[in-house]
Image (spheres, coloured by chain):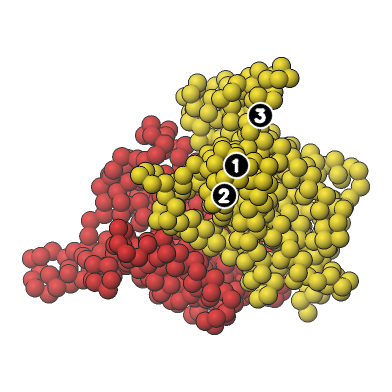
Chain colours: A yellow, B red
């Protein structure tokens, strides 16, 4: 499998001049527009109007305060999941275990809440946030350690651990922590003190008519803090410098005295912590309990979000908002048009494929003549 | 737990895994990681039911499954070999695409986004009874399982022969180990990788066809992680056809046992974890180090 650093190719285009930077910023945008075009063609192919399809889609997302609130709500878990992937990417590790990490984080969060029934909110909320992050971090640390200690590729291990996490939490919630007297495989409701407040009240107080039923909650604010935190760690701390150095060139980083093994484990720990924070939205903000199999691929969507956001924390935020728009609009599309909402999945997948291909084309353009010399260079390396 | 019924269903459970892991093997031996197996299985399953539904012939369905699998793998080949984009990312995107597209098409075709109507399954192989007791004896053997089970077992032997006893196999393995050497000898790395990925799509597509035809219908996301289990089996089997097939049988057995365990003392979730835990243990090297092809994951 690819060594750490092979994935650094995706970030390498960033070290270029202003024009190059503009091109690399524009390429995801072009990819998104092209994917919309593909979606439109599919809609036309089944005999519906693409214009009507997109107008319903965007009206659903932006047509009302409620819609915008839903966009932010739908984007929240994707911000965390996207940050997890982007953060690990910077060290050259590909964490596709976000799904498993968010399951463990969510379960630990719900379990901790149920263990502290009498705690006041000022204590419980910070503890639960930390518990969510710790659960995810722990689960991610295992493949991180196996990579650092034994050189086992993290992609396979994170995939395996996704399945193990789903089975493990499934066992725990069905056999041990199931709410008594209920058939549904879910835990009891967490104490009210552990719930994150919804933002409807706040917005109404500043004359924004967000309905009380809107699920947008304080987890969105935590997500914004997480975006800042990811940026801060990567660009303003020694650890972040080491992570980026290892991602760019492992052997150079090692030669410069960086402890590569420790850096890889730390990168995975923090990556998993971001994934675990999905629980702040799903458990503390929305469901208020752990439900078996609750995540419909949030962790995998995080990969798409990170790619689209070019693995930068701010890029992740915008990409997650875009996916939030699509997911919110999809519901409206389902109700008001004859186009099934599954088409949105197709548009999202096409976006990713085009972004990956687009990034590679841009990278080659920017590398310019260097690309042409590559075969001989590889020949030298091989001999 | 070791009853014949369980072993019997273990082989049935293992069949799509065997086909998909052989598919993964051809791709990875050529140096291309194929996480898209999951999506290819799903697409093959959908296409086989679609074709069977409209023609009434499950063998046409099998052909459609293979064809659809190759079509999807062609996307993977184009993205990873021509554009040299990241192989894992491409695989993840293809899996999302397959999940969305099959549900979308199920809705378009049958007006339900969850499942298709049921179709006729595959007739068992048999010789005419009038040929006498010998034919009847043979029928007991060849008629016991759906035909594709035998096809899968034959494919294991064929994959072994192709990889280790043909010039093509040698070139394919060399492409995965040392592409620049292959290139220097005048063999096109690009063609070899395309061949590996297309074979991968054909085999996994066939696996998907078995999966769907065995249950007589398409159900959304019916691959349910089998592509990843097949990938795990391939690694557990140390990138060898026979090893991969044995691992699939073990994992199929775990799945069969798990179904028998529902409502019993041992929680089924723990049996469910077995393939994944075993694979992680195998990778760490406790039971002999599994070594991937040297150039795996590296674009050329």
Q: Residues within 10 Å of mark 3 (few under 14, many from 20)?
A: many
The verdict on a common chain for dots 3 and 1 is yes
The residue pinned by badge 1 equals A194
Q: CA distance from mark 3 to mark 1?
A: 16 Å
Residue at horizontal 66%, vertical 29%? A199
Residue at horizontal 53%, vertical 26%? A333
Q: Are marks 1 and 2 in contact (CB under 8 Å)?
A: yes
Q: Is residue B277 above or below residue A213?
A: below
In primary-sequence order, the first of circles 3 and 1 is 1
Name the spot of residue A284 as percent of width and height, x first: 59, 41
Q: Quadrant of residue A319?
A: top right
The verdict on a common chain for dots 1 and 2 is yes
Q: Is residue B95 above or below residue B245?
A: above
The residue pinned by badge 3 equals A199
In primary-sequence order, the first of circles 3 and 2 is 2
Q: Is residue B159 left or right of residue A91?
A: left
Quadrant into which the C terminus of chain B falls: bottom right
In primary-sequence order, the first of circles 1 and 2 is 2
Name the spot of residue A365 as percent of width and height, x first: 82, 50
Name the spot of residue A70 as percent of width and height, x first: 61, 29
Name the chain under label 3. A
Name the chain under label 2. A
Name the spot of residue B30 as percent of width and height, x first: 59, 68
Residue sitting nearer the eye, B94 or A68: A68
């Amino acid at each position: 499998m690819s060594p750490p650093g092979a994935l650094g190719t995706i970030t390498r285009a960033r070290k270029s001049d202003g024009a190059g930077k503009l091109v690399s910023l524009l390429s995801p945008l072009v990819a998104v527009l092209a994917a919309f075009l593909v979606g439109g063609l599919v809609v036309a192919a089944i005999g519906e109007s693409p214009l009507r399809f997109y107008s319903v889609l965007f009206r659903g997302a932006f047509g009302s305060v409620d819609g915008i609130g839903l966009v932010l709500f739908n984007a929240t878990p994707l911000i965390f999941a996207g940050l997890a992937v982007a953060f690990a990417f910077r060290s050259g590790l590909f964490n596709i275990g976000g799904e498993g990490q968010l399951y463990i984080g969510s379960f630990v969060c719900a379990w901790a809440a149920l263990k502290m029934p009498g705690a006041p909110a000022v204590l419980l909320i910070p503890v639960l946030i930390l518990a969510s992050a710790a659960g995810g971090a722990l689960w991610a640390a295992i493949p991180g350690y196996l990579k650092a200690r034994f050189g086992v590729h993290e992609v396979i291990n994170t995939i395996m651990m996704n399945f193990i996490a789903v089975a493990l939490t499934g066992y725990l919630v069905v056999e041990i922590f199931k709410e008594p007297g209920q058939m549904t495989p879910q835990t009891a409701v967490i104490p009210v003190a552990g719930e994150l407040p919804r933002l409807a009240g706040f917005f109404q107080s500043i004359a924004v008519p967000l309905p009380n039923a809107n699920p947008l909650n304080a987890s969105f604010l935590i997500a914004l803090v997480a975006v800042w935190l990811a940026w801060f760690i990567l660009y303003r701390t020694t650890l972040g410098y080491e992570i980026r150095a290892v991602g760019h060139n492992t052997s150079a980083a090692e030669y410069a005295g960086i402890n590569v093994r420790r850096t890889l484990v730390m990168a995975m720990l923090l990556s998993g912590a971001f994934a675990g924070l999905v629980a702040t939205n799903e458990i503390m903000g929305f469901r208020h309990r752990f439900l078996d199999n609750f995540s419909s691929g949030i962790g995998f969507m995080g990969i798409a979000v990170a790619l689209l956001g070019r693995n930068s924390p701010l890029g992740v935020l915008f990409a997650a908002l875009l996916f939030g728009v699509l997911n919110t609009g999809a519901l409206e599309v389902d109700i008001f048009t004859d186009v099934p909402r599954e088409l949105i999945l197709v548009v999202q997948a096409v976006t990713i494929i085009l972004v990956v291909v687009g990034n590679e084309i841009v990278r080659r353009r920017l590398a310019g003549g260097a690309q042409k010399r590559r075969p001989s260079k590889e020949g030298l390396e091989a001999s | 737990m070791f009853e014949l019924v369980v072993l019997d269903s273990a082989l049935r459970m293992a069949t799509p895994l065997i086909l998909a892991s052989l598919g993964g093997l051809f791709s990875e031996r050529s140096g291309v990681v194929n996480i898209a197996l999951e999506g290819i299985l799903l697409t093959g399953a959908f296409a086989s039911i679609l074709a069977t539904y409209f023609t009434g012939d499950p063998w046409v369905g099998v052909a459609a499954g293979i064809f659809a699998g190759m079509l999807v793998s062609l996307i993977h080949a184009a993205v990873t070999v021509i554009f040299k984009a990241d192989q894992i990312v491409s695989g993840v995107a293809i899996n999302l695409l397959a999940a969305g597209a099959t549900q979308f098409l199920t809705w378009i075709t049958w007006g339900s986004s969850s499942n298709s109507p049921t179709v006729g399954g595959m007739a068992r192989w048999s010789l005419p009874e009038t040929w006498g007791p010998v034919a009847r004896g043979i029928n007991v053997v060849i008629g016991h399982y759906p035909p594709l089970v035998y096809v899968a077992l034959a494919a294991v032997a064929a994959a072994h022969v192709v990889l280790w006893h043909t010039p093509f196999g040698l070139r394919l393995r060399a492409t995965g180990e040392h592409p620049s050497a292959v290139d220097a000898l005048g063999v096109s790395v690009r063609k070899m990788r395309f061949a590996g990925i297309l074979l991968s799509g054909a085999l996994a597509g066939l696996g998907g066809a078995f999966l769907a035809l065995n249950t007589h219908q398409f159900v959304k996301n019916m691959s349910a992680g089998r592509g990843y289990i097949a990938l795990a089996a391939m690694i557990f089997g140390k990138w060898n056809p026979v090893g991969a097939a044995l691992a699939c049988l073990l994992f199929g057995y775990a799945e069969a046992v798990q179904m028998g365990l529902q409502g019993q003392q041992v929680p089924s979730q723990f049996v469910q974890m077995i393939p994944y835990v075993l694979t992680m243990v195998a990778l760490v090297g406790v039971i002999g180090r599994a070594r991937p092809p040297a150039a795996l994951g590296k674009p050329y």
